[in-house]
Image (cartoon, helix red, strand yellow):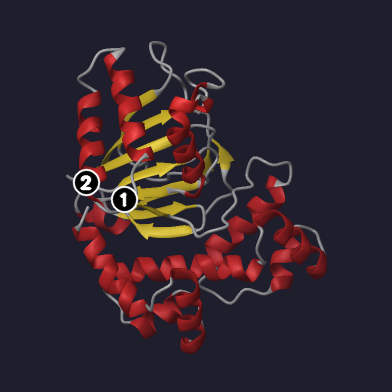
Amino acid sequence: MHKPHLLRVPSPLASSYVLKGDGIAWDNPWHYHPEIELLYCLRGKGTNFVGNAIRSIEEGELLLFGKNLPHTRQRDRAYYEQHTGEEPETIVVQFRDDFLGENFFDLPEFGPIRGLLDRALRGLRFFGETHRQATHHLLALGDLAEPRRLLRLLDLLDGLARSTEFEYLNPLGYVSTVHEKASEKMAAVYEYTIGHFREPIALGTVAALTNLSTAAFCRYFKLRARKSYFEYLAEVRIGYACKLLTEGSLNVSEVCYASGFNNLSHFHRQFRRIVQATPVEYQRMGRGRVAGL
């Protein structure tokens, strides 16, 4: 995984937002951008990396990424090398929170949408009737002319904003720091963690990435991430464990060690603390969640 870099999204000449299809590039970089991003996966196999969250790409998923939330979507290389006639396909809408004017979403009438955009800073996944209505709107957007397309987009966002049928992709307290002056040091930490979380990680090794002493790094990281480094590392590992549990090819013990934990009891404690469920309970709920898109 590479250091997250700023991705500049070109704006179309005839519109203040972007509506496009996305096939997921083979080497899709770990990136962020000021545009909010709404994705509807029509088909695809691979892995989503969103902030601290690591999850399998689910066909039919509807996701919303807030501005500057680092993310990437990676193809399942082995699958697509074996199925050369298949291509992933996603409908993507990208827009800035000021694309209708600097204070547009601060108007009382659009307060719910402002709340939605704030929640999206942690990444959101929608399901149930909200998912069905929103994807219906998305599929229709391409056939509409302006300004009806813009009105439909606002209606879609309002529906998402008023819904309770969503889940956060990142745990409570996740803070993106990629746009801060300190982003280079934090990005180096995130890059190393995402690339090595399945292995033992020494605090001194991570601190060296920031040119800080171990004690100074601990204070530095907690000030910016609002959690200790090992709390963050546990969240990354549990996120990967959730992905493996949903895929269902490994038992709980195998998932524990494949996720970077070296103690099954510790794995269970961390899993329950972060997910508020046991691994077996999550696996059962996860399968139902995929089926209930």
Q: Is residue 5 left or right of residue 125?
A: right
Residue on which the image places disc 1? 165
Q: Position of residue 201 (x, y in %)?
A: 62, 73
Evaluate if marks 2 and 1 touch, with contact meaning CB atoms under 8 Å apart: yes
Q: Position of residue 27 (x, y in %)?
A: 42, 45
Q: Position of residue 185 (x, y in %)?
A: 71, 52
Q: Amino acid at mark 1?
A: Glu
Q: Nearer the viewer, residue 3 or 241?
A: 241
Q: Is residue 1 left or right of residue 157?
A: right
Q: Mark 2 or mark 1: name the one nearer the start of the chain.
A: 2
Q: CA distance from mark 2 to mark 1?
A: 8 Å
Q: Amino acid at mark 2?
A: Glu
Where, by quadrant of the figure, is residue 131 drawn? top left
In the image, residue 270 sits, relative to residue 9, either above or below, namely below
The tag on residue 64 is none
In the image, residue 26 sits, relative to residue 267, either above or below, namely above
Answer whether residue 182 is visible to the viewer in this image: yes
Give me the residue at 51% from left, 52% from top. Answer: 51
Give me the residue at 22% from left, 52% from top. Answer: 293
Residue on which the image places disc 2? 129
Q: Nearer the viewer, residue 147 or 95?
A: 147
Q: Secondary structure at mark 2?
A: helix
In the image, residue 97 sits, relative to residue 29, either above or below, namely above
Give me the residue at 31% from left, 12% from top. Answer: 147
Give me the residue at 73% from left, 41% from top. Answer: 181
